[in-house]
Image (cartoon, rainbow, N blue to C red):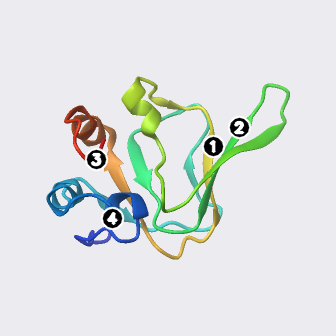
Amino acid sequence: MLPVPPDLSASKLLSTLPQMDRQRIASYLTSVPVAFKQVIYAQDEEIRDVYFPGSGAWSLTKTMEQGGTAEVATVGNEGMIGSSVFFGDPISHTEVIIQVGGDVPAYKMPVVAFKAEMEKHGAFS
């Protein structure tokens, strides 16, 4: 684990938060190294942490019952992965894999902390 910078500048999403919110949110975050082709979530796996990419492109792919796979979304440092937990869905219905980059760490946040912050209905939500 790496220290979390207080400005959270690697994540465009987190860096837009007001300073007071950024400081509070930073206390829940862990900076984690990511690597090309690393799987963040497996399809049908429980989501334990939400992720804020620091760089690159994270692909969300869906494997159908017939075996075919399709990319359904791409997320970069402007977004996040795992927000479905707030809406009551604790399972990842896609595989999330690092397709481009991995040179800048991502931030991860435990689901419990994420839900608590979302319930405040502040700038973070």
Rendering coords of residue 43 (x, y %): 62, 36
- Tell whether label 4 touches label 2 (CB within 8 Å): no
- Amino acid type at circle 1 is Glu
Answer with left or right where residue 95 lies relative to residue 91: right
Viewer-side label of 1, 4 = 4
Find the distance from the CA under tag 2 to the CA under tag 1: 6 Å
Q: Quadrant of the C terminus?
A: top left
Q: Quadrant of the N terminus?
A: bottom left
Find the distance from the CA under tag 1 to the CA under tag 3: 25 Å
Viewer-side label of 1, 3 = 3
| Residue 62 numbered mark, or none | 2
Rendering coords of residue 93 (x, y %): 60, 32
Find the distance from the CA under tag 1 to the CA under tag 4: 26 Å
Above or below: residue 113 compared with residue 7: above
At horizontal 45% and vertical 67% (from top left) the residue drawn is: 54
The residue that label 4 is drawn on is 15
Find the distance from the CA under tag 2 to the CA under tag 3: 28 Å
At horizontal 49% and vertical 62% (from top left) the residue drawn is: 77
Is disc 1 surrounded by few (<14), some (14 to 19) or many (20+) residues within 10 Å?
Answer: many
The residue that label 3 is drawn on is 124
